[in-house]
Image (tube, rainbow, N blue to C red):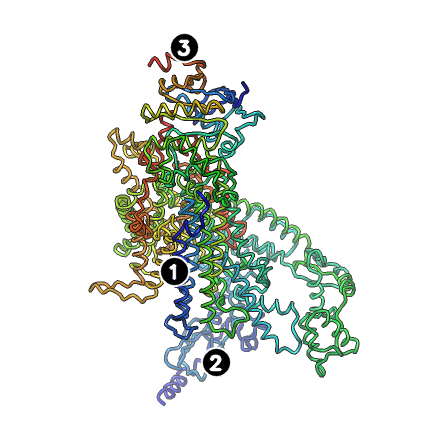
Amino acid sequence: MKTLLEVSGVSVSFDGFKAINNLSFQIGKAEMRAIIGPNGAGKTTFMDIITGKTRADEGRVLWGDKSVSLLKMSEAQIARAGVGRKFQRPTVFEDQSVFANLAMALKKDRSPFSVLFYRGNTADTEKVEALAAEIGLTDQLSRKSGELSHGQKQWLEIGMLLAQDPQLLLVDEPAAGMTPEEREHTTSILVEAAKTRAVVVVEHDMEFVRRLNCKVTVLHEGSVLAEGSLDHVTSNQDVIDVYLGR
Amino acid sequence: MRVILLALAAILCLAPSLQAQTGPVQDLLQTHRALIEKGSRKSIAPAIDAIAASGLTEAQTVLQTWQAKDMWQRKEDKLFFRAEEVAKKTYRLYDFDSGEAVGDFDKGDLKQLKPNSGVRAMIGAALVRFQLSDPDPVRRLAALEAIQRDAEASHLEPLRASIPDEPDATIKARKEQLATLLTLRFGSDEPTRLKAIESIATNISLDSRAALNTLLTTKREISVGPAPEGTNVAAIMKPGKDLDQDAAYDMLADKGLVPPRLSPADIRTTLAAHIDGGKVAGVPVATLNTDEARAKAYAALVAQGMAQSQPTDGEIAAALAAHTIYDAYVEPSAAVTAAAEKALASIKTRVSMNQMLDLALDGISLASIFFLAAIGLAITFGVMGVINMAHGEFIMMGAYTGYVVQQLIPNYTVSILVALPLAFAVTFAAGVAMERLVIRWLYNRPLETLLATFGISIALQQIAKNIFGTQARPLTSPGWLDGAWVMNDVVSISYIRIAIFVLALTFLALFLFIMKRTRLGLETRAVTQNPRMAASMGINPDRVNMLTFGLGSGIAGIAGVAIGLFAKVTSELGSDYIVQSFMTVVVGGVGNIWGTLAGAAMIGFLQKGIEWMNPSNTLAAQTYMIIFIIIFIQFRPRGIIALKGRAAGD
Amino acid sequence: MTRQPLFAKNPSLLIFLACLALFTLLVTVFSEAMGTGLISTSFVKTLGKTLCLCLIAIAMDLVWGYAGILSLGHFAFFGLGGYMIGMWLMYARTRDIVVTSMANAEIPPTNAEVIDGIGNQIFGVVGSSDFPLVWAFAHSLTLQLILVVAVPGILALIFGWLAFRSRVTGVYLSILTQAMTLALALYLFQNDSGLRGNNGLSGLQNLPGADHIPQATISLWFLWASALALALGYGFATWVVSGKFGSVLRGIRDDEARVRFLGYSVEGYKLFIFTVTAIIAAIAGALYYPQAGIINPAEIAPIASIYLAVWVAIGGRGRLYGAVIGAALVSLVSTWFTGGQVPSIPLGFYTIDWVDWWQVVLGLSFVLITLFAPKGIGGLFDLFTGRTPPNRHGKDLGPDSGALQEQEADA
């Protein structure tokens, strides 16, 4: 399997506190990966580094076939390169309709001028409607997204992520605050997505991780503690000590 | 009628004394009677010199009397007396030698000597030697100052003579200093002067610089061919290099050495004078609206011999080549001017070093003002993250509080001591009220806080205008803050600015103390960092916010009193400082008092530095400073002392 | 989002244009130029100026209400636009005067003499007679009209690029724009800025070569021009915000980081809207100052830009008609109050003179609106349409933005 993203030897510190310490990580082109770890393990910071929100002090982050470094790129450039991110807290544009939210995320030329003259077309509308159907928000298309329930916002955010058509999805706690049925649906969307692209899921919920049925990376104090199948890592003594045992 | 009779009687009574005493003074005056009567500035000098040099004890009195226009001459025998008016048109005369009254005379029998101002000045100069040894030190100082103002060669001798007997050490030093300055200008021989020049080469006082500059006065001269031998040439002006070619030619023309260049206006006038039937030299007037056409018409006039020809470029160049334009020292001795140049250069280095020091002091004092104005903001904006556009108006309220207190308490020292805490109380209350009524509802909506507090700001400004009017109100500092600490002629700093510097340091200490050592500081920091956690630990965030905001506002009030002491108190006082205050906080780094200090120092020094480069224009200095700050923020968006990492809160 | 005509999607645009047309028609009919004289020429000018203020309010609403950039510098662009057109007006008018006065000379003047004469006339007050470099194009209306757009546009572009590139946002950006405005005003206050220092440019109400046309007529022309500019500006703004671009702008306002993670270069969008609105502001200024007759650096002072924000906030930001209503209402009411036409209120011990107290009322009413009616006057329209917008930001993590964010706390 070819490598899509390669993170090697990355460190970052905040005022002396090493949030990420010599972390290395790899993911292939169509792969599902779950990241688990206790609070403060650096999961979110790890995502911040990949998406350009936080600058690494040292190390390399290489992307794609051409092995471009992501460290020099801005958040928007990284997103356009094909990294999509779903935040832990649902962050949708609450003042705008579900349709507008999805349309904004749709993979298109993002330069100001082409957006200014973009006036919508049937093909795009159909794409948005298809996405809405996938995330179960067809009836809510014209509603303001601020009126949606918490779960629906999570869906919408996943929908926006899919609309971007990224090669790598970074998903932060997608199942938080969802009912069991909703989780089921989320799992299937993610598994489906992982068939054509890489998906990284950060999750606390072991049950959810088990259902994803994928390779697991355990982070602890900013570096990788263990990697392998869920059964493999849960039987690892180190992991039990720092995380599961407590 | 009675008056005349009385006068007649008086004359009759006193008549016998007429032939009486004449003394050495009167003799002397009589010797120079013709000159004194004539009273012309051009010829009077020998008479004055003779009196001054006579060595008579009364000489000073005579000169003073003369200068004060109190010297009268009796028409009858041409004798001179001091006169006092005793009744209308009646004068009592006093003899100079004895000092006794001679008798009362009618004005008609007397003639007042009215020396003109030129003569009086000369008498004054002659009087100097007496004043220099006057028993009254005040008069001796006055004499020294008079000499300094208008030095003459003749002063040098009496000045030197008065030094050994001078009892007062300070005055003696000044006399010696002045003697040196006079020596270098009027000294009799070159070595003495050179020595004098050398001796002041380390002296940065204004006087010594002025003396050297006077020595180095130059005059622009023009000579045919090279500069004449024996001239003390300072510099030769090369046309086209040191001065404009045309300007050089015009100088020659002014001296009548060459025919003048014709300006376009001259050509125009000449053309206009030769209009003949709508044509000038055959060229129709209507077409004369370009320089070329005018030149053509003018050339035609010249050809007809009706106008003077314009010098060609070649002629101008030739004329310039034939003449030398140079600056010559008025002082003939080249050795003296060279030494003076050298001394002045070395003084200039010292002066510029001292100016740097002075600039640094100015910078510190400006920085203290910015710091004072900004420290309240550093609390409300820096610590609480609340933008308070009315902060400037709190400063203004503090200043007006000081003004009102001064109206009630006339003693300036007491009123300032009362005003400081009162200003704090007033603005603290205003701040708390504002926090309770407005800002509390707008936490987390910074832009709306900005606008709401701006609304308060314009309302407060207008209210102040309605109460106190638009004219500036004075806030007078106590007497002991008047004046300045003068280190030398270059470096000085006013006591008020020192006081403000001390006040700024006090507030820095106070702030650090409150934040690091008190319960309020601890709670403030807790609420700032995590309000929810702080609340769950029993801290009441509402109360802490209120007190913190009040504290920031109260300090603004005190800053207002301080600023009011040197700036005019108007309703716009605050808005003059608000932008700079925000800049100080932003440049320094939000949320850090040391950052505010660094920001104030940077902005203060920067503004003074730019002002120094372009002293005529403080507006430009402010403009450039703001542009600099905008660029600075490019490189350090979070200010000089930036919080890093998560605490910075993206 | 299928293709729909702009008017169908934005019924308010049609209503607005109809109101504006009716307003212009009524003012025209009742103006002195048309003989009825119910509306004095000076009031026609006031109305014309108000239309220009509405236009800059629209610009402010675009940049603040939609994109969330509280610029305290747009009045600087407005003023710059005024200065640019003022230079031509003053130059051309002075030229007419100089040429007339020189016409009687025995010898016809050369070009250089005419220009010297103009320079003397214009710069006499600042003790100079030479044309500074900035006046290089003042002789040409076309070039100077280009400068109306170019100078503020380029200034906004440079400033915006610097500010947005370094990710200065929120109140910091506001303070920075305020500083820029202050710097510009202070610069123009200098005599050697080349724009006549604090004298500013004057006599702008006189159109060159139109001395025979009465001011009553000229004021109508400017009213029409202002109305046309406002209509075009409103239409343009509606077009910009109605599409996906508007969607992105509002996204930037509400959650800048999220838009960035969607792959939009937020800086580019901000720079675009900042520059475009600066140009709109400049055009408004270029129409305003010929009606005002005089422009000086005090007009550019930061306070003017803050008032602009006040108008938009009072009218209701994030909706274009709100900005127009706010600007028109507040500026007209201000004129009314400060003009001394409102009767004073005697209280026995004190008489409230509105010339003195209007500012206080304005300031306090502004505080009240911010506190109790954040949607402004425009919010009233929601009562008719029954629109109830959602709570925009969902749950806040803490009462203070300095608090650790939830995702950080849990990481």
Q: Quadrant of the C terminus of chain B?
A: top left
Left or right relative to B281: residue B380: left
Label 1 neighbour load within 10 Å: few <14, some 14-19, many 20+: few
Left or right relative to A72: residue A241: left
* Number of numbered discs: 3
Can residue B506 be seen from the camera position used here? no
Q: Secondary structure at mark 1?
A: helix
Judging from the image, mark 2 belongs to the subunit labelled: B
Judging from the image, mark 1 belongs to the subunit labelled: C
Can residue A16 be seen from the camera position used here? yes
The residue that mark 3 highlights is A236
- Closest to the camera, between mark 3 and mark 2, is 3
* Image disc number at residue B427: none
Who is closer to the viewer here, A76 or B79?
A76
* Image disc number at residue C19: 1
Looking at the image, the residue that sits furthest to the left is C348
Q: Position of residue A121 (x, y in %)?
A: 48, 42
Label 3 neighbour load within 10 Å: few <14, some 14-19, many 20+: some
Q: Position of residue B467 (x, y in %)?
A: 29, 59
Residue displayed at 27% across by 40% down: B546
Q: Secondary structure at mark 3?
A: loop
User: Relative to residue A227, is residue B586 depicted above or below?
Assistant: below
Left or right relative to B157: residue C336: left
* Image disc number at residue B111: 2
Q: Position of residue B237 (x, y in %)?
A: 70, 57
CB within 8 Å, label 2 to label 1:
no
Please state which amino acid type lies under the numbered disc 3: Asn
Between the residue at mark 3 and the residue at mark 2, the CA separation in whole angstroms equals: 129 Å
Between the residue at mark 2 and the residue at mark 1, the CA separation in whole angstroms equals: 95 Å
